[in-house]
Amino acid sequence: EWMPTGVIDFFGSHPDALESESPDDFTEIMKTMDILGVSDARSLLDLLARRRVIDWEEKRILDATLIAGKTLKYVSQPGEYERLKSRRKNALKAIRVYLIKILK
């Protein structure tokens, strides 16, 4: 699995991004991944966790939901859904801010 569509979500795209992505958008994604020295979404999440952009729990949440394609309800324990939903939202925001910052 080279680059799952989940990586596109880090850039704030629509969930059906492959259908709506322009070649320029894809080029930007590839440029960013090249700058960071990663080849796939899991490597990107690992790098972001090591750089403390996200923490390891957030990495696991994003890996399960964006890369493995599981729903948040499926991966959460009873009573944990809202907390994990908030963690995922905050992690995606932190990733977007970080990526925008390094691309400047």
Image (tube, rainbow, N blue to C red):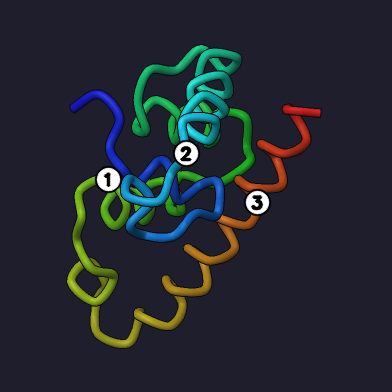
- The residues tagged by marks 3 and 1 sit, at their Cα atoms, a distance apart of 18 Å
Residue at (35, 80) in percent of width and height = 81
Three-letter amino acid code at disc 3?
Ala
Q: Is residue 64 above or below residue 44?
A: below
Three-letter amino acid code at disc 2?
Ser
Which circle's residue, 1 or 2, is located before the other in the chain? Answer: 2
As helix, strand or loop, the secondary structure at mark 3 comes to: helix
Residue 12 appears left or right of 75: right
Residue at (44, 30) in percent of width and height = 46
- Which residue matches tag 3? 94
Residue 86 appears left or right of 95: left
Which circle's residue, 2 or 3, is located before the other in the chain? Answer: 2
Q: Position of residue 17 (x, y in %)?
A: 38, 51
Q: Quadrant of residue 43?
A: top left
Instruction: Verify CB contact (< 8 Å) between mark 3 and mark 1.
Output: no
- Which residue matches tag 2? 22
As helix, strand or loop, the secondary structure at mark 2 comes to: loop
- Which residue matches tag 1? 67
